[in-house]
Image: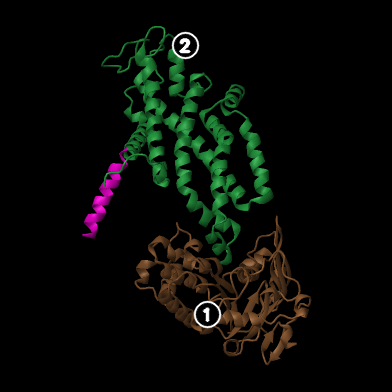
Amino acid sequence: MSLLRIIGLKAYFPTQDGIVKAVNTVDLEIEKNERVGLIGETGCGKTVLGFAIMRLLQPSTNIEGRIMYNGKDLLKLSEEEMRKIRGKEIAMIFQNPPTFLNPVLKIGYQIAESTQLHQGLDKKAAKEKAVGMLEAVKIPLSSKRVSEYPHQFSGGMKERAMIAMGLACDPSLIIADEPTKGLDITIKMQIVKLMKEVTRQGSMLFITHDLGVAAEICDNIAVMYAGELVEYAKTEDIFKNPMHPYTRGFLNSLPSRGLKQIRGISPSLIDLPSGCRFHPRCDHIEEVCKNWHPEMVECDKGHYVRCLQYG
Amino acid sequence: MHRKVAFIIGKKRLKRNVAFTISIYILVAFSIIAIFSPVLTPYDPYTITGTPLEKPSMGHILGTNDLGQDIFSRLIYGTGITLFVGFVGGGLAILIGTFVGIVSGYYGGVIDEFITRGIDLLMVIPMFPLLLVLASFLEVSMTRISILMGILGWTMFARVIRSQVLSLSEYNFIYGAKAMGASDSYIMIKHILPNILPLIIVKFVFAVQTYMIMGVGLGFLGLGDPTTISWGQMINRAYTNGGFALGMWWWLLPPGLIIAFLSIALSLGGYSLEDKINPRLRREIEIS
Protein backbone atom coordinates (compact mmCIF):
# COMPACT_ATOMS: atom_id res chain seq x y z
CA MET A 1 0.00 0.00 0.00
CA SER A 2 1.32 3.38 -0.91
CA LEU A 3 1.81 6.00 1.74
CA LEU A 4 -0.13 8.72 0.02
CA ARG A 5 -2.57 8.24 -2.78
CA ILE A 6 -4.41 11.16 -4.30
CA ILE A 7 -7.41 10.14 -6.35
CA GLY A 8 -9.26 12.57 -8.61
CA LEU A 9 -8.43 15.62 -6.51
CA LYS A 10 -10.07 18.88 -7.49
CA ALA A 11 -9.68 22.20 -5.75
CA TYR A 12 -11.80 25.10 -6.97
CA PHE A 13 -11.82 28.59 -5.53
CA PRO A 14 -14.94 30.64 -6.03
CA THR A 15 -13.96 34.25 -6.73
CA GLN A 16 -15.72 37.33 -8.04
CA ASP A 17 -14.33 36.79 -11.54
CA GLY A 18 -15.34 33.15 -11.67
CA ILE A 19 -14.23 29.80 -10.38
CA VAL A 20 -10.47 29.33 -10.25
CA LYS A 21 -9.85 25.71 -11.09
CA ALA A 22 -6.47 25.42 -9.45
CA VAL A 23 -6.33 21.62 -9.26
CA ASN A 24 -8.15 19.52 -11.82
CA THR A 25 -8.53 15.80 -11.23
CA VAL A 26 -5.04 15.00 -10.06
CA ASP A 27 -4.06 11.39 -9.39
CA LEU A 28 -0.74 10.88 -7.69
CA GLU A 29 0.86 8.19 -5.60
CA ILE A 30 3.78 8.40 -3.22
CA GLU A 31 5.32 5.20 -1.90
CA LYS A 32 7.18 4.85 1.36
CA ASN A 33 10.64 6.40 1.09
CA GLU A 34 9.86 7.75 -2.33
CA ARG A 35 10.65 11.30 -3.30
CA VAL A 36 8.34 12.73 -5.89
CA GLY A 37 9.02 16.04 -7.57
CA LEU A 38 6.09 18.14 -8.63
CA ILE A 39 7.22 20.61 -11.23
CA GLY A 40 5.45 23.20 -13.26
CA GLU A 41 5.40 26.90 -13.94
CA THR A 42 4.18 29.52 -11.50
CA GLY A 43 0.45 29.49 -11.05
CA CYS A 44 -0.21 25.97 -12.26
CA GLY A 45 -1.59 24.77 -8.96
CA LYS A 46 1.44 23.07 -7.42
CA THR A 47 1.26 24.86 -4.11
CA VAL A 48 -2.50 24.51 -3.92
CA LEU A 49 -2.06 20.76 -4.26
CA GLY A 50 0.39 20.78 -1.37
CA PHE A 51 -1.91 22.89 0.79
CA ALA A 52 -4.84 20.66 -0.13
CA ILE A 53 -3.03 17.62 1.23
CA MET A 54 -2.47 19.48 4.49
CA ARG A 55 -6.05 20.75 4.41
CA LEU A 56 -4.84 24.29 4.85
CA LEU A 57 -6.92 25.84 2.10
CA GLN A 58 -9.63 28.36 2.92
CA PRO A 59 -12.89 26.78 4.09
CA SER A 60 -14.64 28.30 1.06
CA THR A 61 -12.60 26.13 -1.34
CA ASN A 62 -14.45 23.33 -3.07
CA ILE A 63 -12.37 20.19 -2.74
CA GLU A 64 -13.39 16.93 -4.33
CA GLY A 65 -11.72 13.58 -4.63
CA ARG A 66 -9.85 11.52 -2.11
CA ILE A 67 -6.49 11.85 -0.41
CA MET A 68 -5.67 8.47 1.06
CA TYR A 69 -2.93 8.57 3.63
CA ASN A 70 -2.09 5.22 5.24
CA GLY A 71 -5.56 4.03 4.28
CA LYS A 72 -7.36 7.05 5.77
CA ASP A 73 -9.07 9.67 3.66
CA LEU A 74 -7.62 12.96 4.88
CA LEU A 75 -10.53 14.91 3.45
CA LYS A 76 -12.97 13.01 5.66
CA LEU A 77 -11.08 13.46 8.92
CA SER A 78 -12.32 15.86 11.55
CA GLU A 79 -10.29 18.99 12.22
CA GLU A 80 -9.14 17.44 15.48
CA GLU A 81 -7.84 14.27 13.80
CA MET A 82 -6.24 16.30 11.04
CA ARG A 83 -4.38 18.37 13.60
CA LYS A 84 -2.76 15.22 14.94
CA ILE A 85 -1.46 14.41 11.46
CA ARG A 86 -0.18 17.87 10.60
CA GLY A 87 3.37 18.38 11.73
CA LYS A 88 3.60 14.90 13.21
CA GLU A 89 3.03 12.66 10.21
CA ILE A 90 2.87 15.09 7.33
CA ALA A 91 5.02 18.16 7.66
CA MET A 92 5.35 21.08 5.35
CA ILE A 93 8.45 23.09 4.51
CA PHE A 94 7.45 26.41 3.06
CA GLN A 95 8.97 28.74 0.57
CA ASN A 96 9.81 32.24 1.69
CA PRO A 97 10.84 31.45 5.27
CA PRO A 98 11.04 35.08 6.44
CA THR A 99 7.28 35.24 6.35
CA PHE A 100 6.75 31.78 7.76
CA LEU A 101 8.71 32.45 10.92
CA ASN A 102 7.01 34.36 13.69
CA PRO A 103 9.17 37.46 14.22
CA VAL A 104 8.54 37.68 17.96
CA LEU A 105 9.33 34.08 18.89
CA LYS A 106 12.74 32.54 19.29
CA ILE A 107 13.96 30.23 16.54
CA GLY A 108 14.45 27.38 19.00
CA TYR A 109 10.92 27.67 20.27
CA GLN A 110 9.51 27.57 16.77
CA ILE A 111 11.57 24.55 15.78
CA ALA A 112 10.58 22.55 18.82
CA GLU A 113 6.99 23.72 18.71
CA SER A 114 5.70 20.66 16.92
CA THR A 115 7.43 18.33 19.36
CA GLN A 116 5.83 20.20 22.22
CA LEU A 117 2.47 19.95 20.52
CA HIS A 118 2.62 16.31 19.53
CA GLN A 119 5.06 14.59 21.85
CA GLY A 120 4.42 16.71 24.92
CA LEU A 121 8.07 17.54 25.48
CA ASP A 122 8.72 19.95 28.32
CA LYS A 123 10.57 23.21 27.80
CA LYS A 124 14.02 21.86 28.53
CA ALA A 125 13.69 18.77 26.38
CA ALA A 126 12.22 20.87 23.60
CA LYS A 127 15.17 23.21 23.69
CA GLU A 128 17.59 20.30 23.54
CA LYS A 129 15.64 18.94 20.60
CA ALA A 130 15.86 22.33 18.89
CA VAL A 131 19.62 22.45 19.40
CA GLY A 132 19.88 18.95 17.92
CA MET A 133 17.75 19.93 14.94
CA LEU A 134 19.82 23.04 14.30
CA GLU A 135 22.92 20.86 14.36
CA ALA A 136 21.28 18.46 11.93
CA VAL A 137 20.67 21.30 9.49
CA LYS A 138 24.28 22.40 10.00
CA ILE A 139 23.86 25.73 11.69
CA PRO A 140 27.05 26.51 13.61
CA LEU A 141 26.96 27.47 17.30
CA SER A 142 23.55 25.87 17.53
CA SER A 143 23.30 26.11 21.30
CA LYS A 144 23.66 29.88 21.04
CA ARG A 145 21.64 30.30 17.89
CA VAL A 146 18.71 28.47 19.37
CA SER A 147 17.76 31.46 21.51
CA GLU A 148 17.98 34.00 18.70
CA TYR A 149 15.13 35.59 16.82
CA PRO A 150 14.41 35.17 13.09
CA HIS A 151 15.76 38.61 12.19
CA GLN A 152 19.18 37.53 13.45
CA PHE A 153 19.30 34.73 10.88
CA SER A 154 20.38 35.12 7.28
CA GLY A 155 18.16 33.97 4.42
CA GLY A 156 19.86 30.62 3.99
CA MET A 157 19.84 30.02 7.73
CA LYS A 158 16.15 30.81 7.91
CA GLU A 159 15.53 28.19 5.24
CA ARG A 160 17.59 25.72 7.25
CA ALA A 161 15.60 26.57 10.35
CA MET A 162 12.44 26.05 8.33
CA ILE A 163 13.65 22.61 7.30
CA ALA A 164 14.50 21.84 10.92
CA MET A 165 10.97 22.86 11.89
CA GLY A 166 9.51 20.49 9.33
CA LEU A 167 11.66 17.59 10.40
CA ALA A 168 11.40 18.01 14.17
CA CYS A 169 8.78 15.30 14.63
CA ASP A 170 10.25 12.82 12.12
CA PRO A 171 7.25 13.00 9.81
CA SER A 172 6.69 10.14 7.40
CA LEU A 173 5.79 12.54 4.60
CA ILE A 174 7.30 15.93 3.92
CA ILE A 175 5.73 18.40 1.56
CA ALA A 176 8.42 20.83 0.55
CA ASP A 177 7.02 23.85 -1.23
CA GLU A 178 9.86 25.39 -3.24
CA PRO A 179 12.33 25.50 -0.37
CA THR A 180 15.03 26.75 -2.70
CA LYS A 181 13.12 29.68 -4.11
CA GLY A 182 14.79 33.03 -3.73
CA LEU A 183 18.12 31.68 -2.53
CA ASP A 184 21.27 32.41 -4.42
CA ILE A 185 22.94 29.58 -6.24
CA THR A 186 25.62 28.58 -3.73
CA ILE A 187 23.18 28.56 -0.83
CA LYS A 188 20.71 26.72 -3.01
CA MET A 189 23.09 23.86 -3.65
CA GLN A 190 23.83 23.62 0.07
CA ILE A 191 20.13 23.45 0.86
CA VAL A 192 19.57 20.83 -1.83
CA LYS A 193 22.38 18.73 -0.41
CA LEU A 194 20.96 19.12 3.04
CA MET A 195 17.44 18.22 1.94
CA LYS A 196 18.81 15.10 0.32
CA GLU A 197 20.64 14.11 3.46
CA VAL A 198 17.97 14.78 6.02
CA THR A 199 15.13 13.22 4.06
CA ARG A 200 16.84 9.93 3.45
CA GLN A 201 14.18 8.29 5.54
CA GLY A 202 10.65 9.22 4.80
CA SER A 203 8.80 10.26 1.72
CA MET A 204 8.69 13.65 0.18
CA LEU A 205 6.61 15.64 -2.22
CA PHE A 206 8.99 18.22 -3.56
CA ILE A 207 7.22 21.14 -5.19
CA THR A 208 9.45 23.27 -7.38
CA HIS A 209 9.84 24.93 -10.73
CA ASP A 210 13.54 24.30 -10.68
CA LEU A 211 14.25 21.22 -12.77
CA GLY A 212 17.87 21.01 -11.71
CA VAL A 213 16.94 20.85 -8.06
CA ALA A 214 14.20 18.33 -8.72
CA ALA A 215 16.62 16.12 -10.66
CA GLU A 216 19.05 16.25 -7.77
CA ILE A 217 16.54 15.19 -5.12
CA CYS A 218 13.65 13.24 -6.60
CA ASP A 219 13.13 9.64 -7.66
CA ASN A 220 10.09 10.42 -9.76
CA ILE A 221 8.82 13.57 -11.31
CA ALA A 222 5.30 14.69 -12.02
CA VAL A 223 4.85 17.58 -14.39
CA MET A 224 1.87 19.80 -13.77
CA TYR A 225 0.24 22.14 -16.23
CA ALA A 226 -2.89 24.24 -15.72
CA GLY A 227 -4.02 22.27 -12.71
CA GLU A 228 -3.49 18.78 -14.03
CA LEU A 229 -0.63 16.34 -14.34
CA VAL A 230 0.63 15.99 -17.89
CA GLU A 231 3.53 13.63 -17.43
CA TYR A 232 4.79 11.30 -14.73
CA ALA A 233 7.96 9.24 -14.93
CA LYS A 234 11.24 8.38 -13.31
CA THR A 235 13.51 11.38 -13.07
CA GLU A 236 15.99 10.06 -15.61
CA ASP A 237 13.22 9.23 -18.07
CA ILE A 238 11.87 12.76 -17.83
CA PHE A 239 15.26 14.15 -18.70
CA LYS A 240 16.29 11.56 -21.31
CA ASN A 241 12.98 11.02 -22.95
CA PRO A 242 10.48 13.78 -22.27
CA MET A 243 7.27 12.89 -24.07
CA HIS A 244 4.77 15.63 -23.45
CA PRO A 245 5.37 18.72 -25.59
CA TYR A 246 5.08 20.84 -22.47
CA THR A 247 7.79 18.89 -20.67
CA ARG A 248 10.01 19.20 -23.71
CA GLY A 249 9.37 22.92 -23.87
CA PHE A 250 10.06 23.19 -20.16
CA LEU A 251 13.38 21.37 -20.54
CA ASN A 252 14.36 23.45 -23.55
CA SER A 253 13.75 26.58 -21.58
CA LEU A 254 16.59 25.66 -19.21
CA PRO A 255 19.61 27.94 -19.62
CA SER A 256 21.83 24.94 -20.29
CA ARG A 257 19.61 23.89 -23.17
CA GLY A 258 19.36 27.17 -24.96
CA LEU A 259 16.82 29.16 -22.98
CA LYS A 260 14.10 28.62 -25.58
CA GLN A 261 10.81 29.86 -24.27
CA ILE A 262 7.47 28.21 -24.78
CA ARG A 263 5.35 30.52 -26.89
CA GLY A 264 2.20 32.04 -25.54
CA ILE A 265 1.33 32.56 -21.91
CA SER A 266 0.11 30.15 -19.30
CA PRO A 267 -3.67 29.90 -19.37
CA SER A 268 -5.94 31.53 -16.84
CA LEU A 269 -7.22 28.96 -14.39
CA ILE A 270 -10.66 30.57 -14.57
CA ASP A 271 -11.43 29.74 -18.19
CA LEU A 272 -9.25 26.85 -19.22
CA PRO A 273 -8.70 26.06 -22.90
CA SER A 274 -10.98 23.44 -24.39
CA GLY A 275 -9.62 20.05 -25.34
CA CYS A 276 -5.99 19.59 -24.44
CA ARG A 277 -5.11 22.34 -21.98
CA PHE A 278 -1.79 22.88 -23.72
CA HIS A 279 -3.02 23.09 -27.32
CA PRO A 280 -2.82 26.89 -27.75
CA ARG A 281 0.90 26.75 -27.03
CA CYS A 282 1.74 23.39 -28.55
CA ASP A 283 3.97 22.99 -31.63
CA HIS A 284 2.42 19.67 -32.64
CA ILE A 285 -1.17 20.78 -32.62
CA GLU A 286 -3.74 18.87 -34.65
CA GLU A 287 -7.40 19.64 -35.14
CA VAL A 288 -8.49 17.00 -32.64
CA CYS A 289 -6.42 18.57 -29.84
CA LYS A 290 -8.78 21.52 -29.70
CA ASN A 291 -11.80 19.46 -28.72
CA TRP A 292 -10.57 16.25 -27.20
CA HIS A 293 -9.27 16.24 -23.65
CA PRO A 294 -6.66 13.46 -23.49
CA GLU A 295 -6.33 11.00 -20.61
CA MET A 296 -3.12 9.92 -18.88
CA VAL A 297 -1.79 6.84 -20.69
CA GLU A 298 1.13 4.62 -19.84
CA CYS A 299 3.51 4.71 -22.78
CA ASP A 300 6.53 3.08 -21.30
CA LYS A 301 6.70 1.16 -18.08
CA GLY A 302 6.00 3.71 -15.38
CA HIS A 303 5.96 6.59 -17.84
CA TYR A 304 2.60 8.28 -18.08
CA VAL A 305 1.73 11.04 -20.54
CA ARG A 306 -1.39 13.06 -21.22
CA CYS A 307 -1.07 13.73 -24.93
CA LEU A 308 -2.95 12.55 -28.01
CA GLN A 309 0.28 11.77 -29.85
CA TYR A 310 0.73 8.77 -27.64
CA GLY A 311 -2.64 7.22 -27.34
CA MET B 1 34.72 46.17 23.17
CA HIS B 2 31.36 44.61 22.68
CA ARG B 3 30.30 45.43 26.21
CA LYS B 4 31.37 49.03 25.80
CA VAL B 5 29.27 49.44 22.68
CA ALA B 6 26.28 47.92 24.41
CA PHE B 7 26.75 50.28 27.31
CA ILE B 8 26.80 53.33 25.07
CA ILE B 9 23.71 52.17 23.25
CA GLY B 10 22.01 51.51 26.54
CA LYS B 11 22.84 54.98 27.78
CA LYS B 12 21.63 56.58 24.58
CA ARG B 13 18.42 54.67 24.76
CA LEU B 14 17.84 55.86 28.27
CA LYS B 15 18.50 59.43 27.24
CA ARG B 16 16.13 59.23 24.36
CA ASN B 17 13.51 57.89 26.67
CA VAL B 18 13.78 60.41 29.45
CA ALA B 19 10.03 60.80 29.31
CA PHE B 20 9.47 57.11 29.83
CA THR B 21 11.96 56.91 32.67
CA ILE B 22 10.40 59.86 34.45
CA SER B 23 6.94 58.44 34.12
CA ILE B 24 8.07 55.09 35.52
CA TYR B 25 9.66 56.84 38.51
CA ILE B 26 6.51 58.82 39.15
CA LEU B 27 4.31 55.74 38.92
CA VAL B 28 6.54 53.78 41.24
CA ALA B 29 6.56 56.68 43.70
CA PHE B 30 2.78 56.89 43.66
CA SER B 31 2.47 53.13 44.09
CA ILE B 32 4.73 53.28 47.13
CA ILE B 33 2.67 56.12 48.55
CA ALA B 34 -0.51 54.14 47.94
CA ILE B 35 0.82 51.00 49.60
CA PHE B 36 2.41 52.69 52.58
CA SER B 37 -0.14 55.45 53.08
CA PRO B 38 -1.02 54.35 56.66
CA VAL B 39 2.63 54.75 57.59
CA LEU B 40 3.23 57.95 55.68
CA THR B 41 0.31 59.95 56.96
CA PRO B 42 0.90 62.13 60.01
CA TYR B 43 -2.71 61.74 61.18
CA ASP B 44 -5.54 59.28 60.79
CA PRO B 45 -7.52 60.82 57.93
CA TYR B 46 -10.85 59.68 59.36
CA THR B 47 -10.58 61.21 62.80
CA ILE B 48 -10.90 64.83 63.72
CA THR B 49 -7.44 66.00 64.64
CA GLY B 50 -7.77 69.76 64.68
CA THR B 51 -10.22 72.60 64.57
CA PRO B 52 -12.22 72.86 61.31
CA LEU B 53 -10.95 74.98 58.42
CA GLU B 54 -7.43 75.51 59.74
CA LYS B 55 -4.84 77.21 57.55
CA PRO B 56 -1.68 75.34 56.60
CA SER B 57 0.71 75.21 59.52
CA MET B 58 3.53 73.06 60.83
CA GLY B 59 0.98 70.79 62.48
CA HIS B 60 -1.25 70.43 59.47
CA ILE B 61 0.75 70.93 56.28
CA LEU B 62 -2.34 71.55 54.19
CA GLY B 63 -4.62 72.61 56.97
CA THR B 64 -7.86 70.88 57.92
CA ASN B 65 -11.21 70.51 56.23
CA ASP B 66 -14.66 71.52 57.41
CA LEU B 67 -14.75 68.65 59.90
CA GLY B 68 -11.25 69.22 61.21
CA GLN B 69 -9.65 66.24 59.42
CA ASP B 70 -6.08 66.60 58.17
CA ILE B 71 -6.14 67.38 54.44
CA PHE B 72 -2.61 66.18 53.74
CA SER B 73 -3.37 62.76 55.23
CA ARG B 74 -6.55 62.52 53.20
CA LEU B 75 -4.62 63.43 50.05
CA ILE B 76 -2.17 60.61 50.63
CA TYR B 77 -4.96 58.17 51.41
CA GLY B 78 -6.70 59.05 48.17
CA THR B 79 -3.77 57.82 46.05
CA GLY B 80 -4.56 54.16 46.51
CA ILE B 81 -8.17 54.32 45.44
CA THR B 82 -7.38 56.46 42.40
CA LEU B 83 -4.73 54.03 41.19
CA PHE B 84 -7.02 51.12 42.01
CA VAL B 85 -9.88 52.45 39.91
CA GLY B 86 -7.50 53.15 37.01
CA PHE B 87 -5.75 49.82 37.06
CA VAL B 88 -8.77 47.62 37.75
CA GLY B 89 -11.02 49.47 35.31
CA GLY B 90 -8.34 49.74 32.63
CA GLY B 91 -7.10 46.20 33.20
CA LEU B 92 -10.55 44.71 32.94
CA ALA B 93 -11.40 46.71 29.82
CA ILE B 94 -8.15 45.64 28.15
CA LEU B 95 -8.63 42.03 29.16
CA ILE B 96 -12.13 41.79 27.72
CA GLY B 97 -11.16 43.90 24.71
CA THR B 98 -8.14 41.72 23.92
CA PHE B 99 -10.11 38.51 24.20
CA VAL B 100 -12.99 39.70 22.05
CA GLY B 101 -10.65 41.41 19.58
CA ILE B 102 -8.48 38.34 19.06
CA VAL B 103 -11.41 35.97 18.67
CA SER B 104 -13.17 38.32 16.27
CA GLY B 105 -10.11 39.06 14.17
CA TYR B 106 -8.78 35.51 14.09
CA TYR B 107 -11.94 33.66 13.13
CA GLY B 108 -13.25 36.34 10.80
CA GLY B 109 -16.33 35.63 8.71
CA VAL B 110 -19.68 35.37 10.43
CA ILE B 111 -18.22 35.42 13.96
CA ASP B 112 -16.35 38.62 13.19
CA GLU B 113 -19.40 40.22 11.61
CA PHE B 114 -21.53 39.34 14.62
CA ILE B 115 -19.02 40.64 17.16
CA THR B 116 -18.28 43.81 15.20
CA ARG B 117 -21.95 44.70 14.93
CA GLY B 118 -22.34 43.99 18.62
CA ILE B 119 -19.46 46.34 19.38
CA ASP B 120 -21.03 49.01 17.17
CA LEU B 121 -24.21 48.70 19.19
CA LEU B 122 -22.42 48.93 22.53
CA MET B 123 -20.32 51.86 21.39
CA VAL B 124 -23.42 53.96 20.89
CA ILE B 125 -24.02 53.90 24.64
CA PRO B 126 -22.19 56.85 26.18
CA MET B 127 -20.16 55.51 29.03
CA PHE B 128 -19.90 58.42 31.45
CA PRO B 129 -23.62 59.26 31.62
CA LEU B 130 -24.43 55.57 31.97
CA LEU B 131 -21.95 55.32 34.82
CA LEU B 132 -23.63 58.34 36.43
CA VAL B 133 -27.02 56.70 36.24
CA LEU B 134 -25.78 53.33 37.45
CA ALA B 135 -23.76 54.90 40.26
CA SER B 136 -26.79 56.76 41.54
CA PHE B 137 -29.04 53.69 41.41
CA LEU B 138 -26.72 50.97 42.62
CA GLU B 139 -25.15 50.80 45.99
CA VAL B 140 -21.79 52.31 45.14
CA SER B 141 -18.38 51.07 46.06
CA MET B 142 -15.20 51.96 44.23
CA THR B 143 -14.62 48.30 43.35
CA ARG B 144 -18.03 48.08 41.80
CA ILE B 145 -17.51 51.30 39.88
CA SER B 146 -14.17 50.21 38.48
CA ILE B 147 -15.57 46.84 37.43
CA LEU B 148 -18.46 48.63 35.75
CA MET B 149 -15.98 50.83 33.91
CA GLY B 150 -14.14 47.77 32.67
CA ILE B 151 -17.33 46.10 31.52
CA LEU B 152 -18.59 49.22 29.76
CA GLY B 153 -15.33 50.39 28.25
CA TRP B 154 -13.77 47.43 26.46
CA THR B 155 -15.36 48.04 23.06
CA MET B 156 -12.81 50.57 21.83
CA PHE B 157 -9.90 48.27 22.63
CA ALA B 158 -11.62 45.29 21.06
CA ARG B 159 -11.88 47.29 17.84
CA VAL B 160 -8.25 48.32 17.75
CA ILE B 161 -7.02 44.85 18.58
CA ARG B 162 -9.40 43.18 16.14
CA SER B 163 -8.05 45.24 13.26
CA GLN B 164 -4.49 44.27 14.14
CA VAL B 165 -5.33 40.59 14.51
CA LEU B 166 -7.28 40.65 11.27
CA SER B 167 -4.17 41.46 9.27
CA LEU B 168 -1.95 39.31 11.46
CA SER B 169 -4.11 36.23 10.83
CA GLU B 170 -3.28 36.39 7.14
CA TYR B 171 0.44 36.23 7.79
CA ASN B 172 2.21 33.14 6.57
CA PHE B 173 3.53 32.13 9.94
CA ILE B 174 -0.02 31.54 11.10
CA TYR B 175 -0.34 29.01 8.26
CA GLY B 176 3.02 27.65 9.34
CA ALA B 177 1.74 27.08 12.85
CA LYS B 178 -1.40 25.43 11.48
CA ALA B 179 0.73 23.16 9.33
CA MET B 180 2.52 22.16 12.49
CA GLY B 181 -0.70 20.91 13.96
CA ALA B 182 -1.44 23.84 16.25
CA SER B 183 -5.00 24.38 17.39
CA ASP B 184 -6.80 27.69 17.04
CA SER B 185 -6.54 28.54 20.72
CA TYR B 186 -2.84 27.68 20.69
CA ILE B 187 -2.23 29.97 17.72
CA MET B 188 -4.17 32.79 19.32
CA ILE B 189 -2.27 32.58 22.60
CA LYS B 190 1.22 31.65 21.47
CA HIS B 191 1.49 33.31 18.07
CA ILE B 192 -0.92 36.21 17.89
CA LEU B 193 -0.84 37.49 21.46
CA PRO B 194 2.94 38.11 21.61
CA ASN B 195 2.68 40.04 18.35
CA ILE B 196 0.07 42.45 19.66
CA LEU B 197 1.40 42.65 23.22
CA PRO B 198 3.17 46.01 22.66
CA LEU B 199 -0.08 47.50 21.43
CA ILE B 200 -1.96 46.06 24.38
CA ILE B 201 0.51 47.58 26.83
CA VAL B 202 0.25 51.04 25.28
CA LYS B 203 -3.53 50.87 25.24
CA PHE B 204 -3.47 49.71 28.83
CA VAL B 205 -1.46 52.74 29.96
CA PHE B 206 -3.90 55.11 28.28
CA ALA B 207 -6.85 53.17 29.64
CA VAL B 208 -5.49 53.50 33.17
CA GLN B 209 -5.18 57.24 32.68
CA THR B 210 -8.68 57.62 31.29
CA TYR B 211 -10.35 55.56 33.99
CA MET B 212 -8.40 57.24 36.76
CA ILE B 213 -9.68 60.62 35.67
CA MET B 214 -13.14 59.20 35.21
CA GLY B 215 -13.07 57.84 38.74
CA VAL B 216 -12.05 61.23 40.08
CA GLY B 217 -14.74 62.85 37.96
CA LEU B 218 -17.41 60.60 39.40
CA GLY B 219 -16.14 61.38 42.86
CA PHE B 220 -16.29 65.11 42.15
CA LEU B 221 -19.91 64.76 41.08
CA GLY B 222 -20.57 63.17 44.43
CA LEU B 223 -21.25 59.74 43.01
CA GLY B 224 -18.27 57.94 44.45
CA ASP B 225 -18.35 55.91 47.59
CA PRO B 226 -18.71 58.43 50.41
CA THR B 227 -16.98 56.17 52.92
CA THR B 228 -13.68 55.90 51.06
CA ILE B 229 -11.38 58.85 50.69
CA SER B 230 -10.74 59.85 47.10
CA TRP B 231 -9.43 62.93 45.38
CA GLY B 232 -12.63 63.51 43.51
CA GLN B 233 -14.61 63.43 46.69
CA MET B 234 -12.15 65.82 48.32
CA ILE B 235 -12.63 68.38 45.55
CA ASN B 236 -16.36 67.90 45.81
CA ARG B 237 -16.26 68.48 49.56
CA ALA B 238 -14.08 71.54 49.23
CA TYR B 239 -16.43 72.87 46.58
CA THR B 240 -19.65 72.32 48.48
CA ASN B 241 -18.57 72.86 52.06
CA GLY B 242 -17.04 76.27 51.85
CA GLY B 243 -13.49 75.69 50.66
CA PHE B 244 -14.16 77.43 47.36
CA ALA B 245 -16.15 80.28 48.85
CA LEU B 246 -13.53 80.95 51.52
CA GLY B 247 -10.70 80.85 49.01
CA MET B 248 -8.99 77.92 50.71
CA TRP B 249 -6.79 76.96 47.76
CA TRP B 250 -4.77 74.53 49.91
CA TRP B 251 -7.88 72.41 50.20
CA LEU B 252 -9.15 72.71 46.66
CA LEU B 253 -6.01 72.69 44.54
CA PRO B 254 -3.80 69.81 45.78
CA PRO B 255 -6.13 66.97 44.74
CA GLY B 256 -6.65 68.58 41.36
CA LEU B 257 -2.96 69.19 40.79
CA ILE B 258 -1.98 65.73 41.87
CA ILE B 259 -4.43 64.02 39.54
CA ALA B 260 -3.21 66.22 36.71
CA PHE B 261 0.37 65.33 37.59
CA LEU B 262 -0.32 61.59 37.68
CA SER B 263 -2.26 61.82 34.46
CA ILE B 264 0.60 63.61 32.71
CA ALA B 265 3.01 60.97 33.97
CA LEU B 266 0.87 58.23 32.48
CA SER B 267 0.54 60.13 29.20
CA LEU B 268 4.30 60.54 29.00
CA GLY B 269 4.74 56.82 29.57
CA GLY B 270 2.07 55.94 27.06
CA TYR B 271 3.36 58.21 24.32
CA SER B 272 6.97 57.14 24.68
CA LEU B 273 5.91 53.49 24.56
CA GLU B 274 3.86 54.25 21.49
CA ASP B 275 6.94 55.78 19.91
CA LYS B 276 8.80 52.59 20.63
CA ILE B 277 6.31 50.26 18.99
CA ASN B 278 5.69 52.57 16.06
CA PRO B 279 8.83 54.60 15.34
CA ARG B 280 7.06 56.45 12.56
CA LEU B 281 5.26 58.44 15.23
CA ARG B 282 8.57 59.79 16.47
CA ARG B 283 8.86 63.40 15.52
CA GLU B 284 11.98 64.47 17.33
CA ILE B 285 15.25 64.63 15.45
CA GLU B 286 17.69 62.02 16.58
CA ILE B 287 21.22 63.14 17.28
CA SER B 288 23.65 60.36 16.64
Q: Secondary structure at mark 2?
A: helix
Query: Could you say which quadrant of the image residue A276 lies in?
Result: bottom right
- How far across and down, in percent of the image, does residue B61 sit? 30, 18
Which residue is at a point 51% across and 63% down the rendered structure image?
A: A100
Towards the viewer: A68 or B136: A68
Q: How many C-alpha atoms fall within 10 Å of the one at disc 1: few (<14), some, or many (≥20)?
A: some
Label disc, if present, on residue B129 of the rendered structure: none
Q: Name the colour assigned to chain B in the rendering.
A: green
Left or right of B262 on screen, residue A30: right
Query: Is label 2 in contact with label 1 (beta carbons under 8 Å)?
Result: no
Tag 2 residue: B240
Query: Which quadrant is the N terminus of chain B positioned in?
Result: bottom left
| Three-letter code for the amino acid on which mark 1 is drawn | Leu
- How far across and down, in percent of the image, does residue B22 sit? 32, 36
Q: Is residue A88 magenta?
A: no
- How far across and down, in percent of the image, does residue B184 sit? 60, 57
Figure check: A172 above or below A162? below
Chain displayed in brown? A
Of badges 2 and 1, nearer the viewer stands 1
Which chain letter goes with mark 1? A
Q: How is the image coloured?
A: by chain
Label disc, if present, on residue A254 of the rendered structure: 1
First to last magenta residue range: B1-18
Figure check: A31 above or below A99? below
Q: Is residue B11 magenta?
A: yes
| Three-letter code for the amino acid on which mark 2 is drawn | Thr
- How far across and down, in percent of the image, does residue A291 sit? 78, 75
Left or right of A262 on screen, residue A216: left
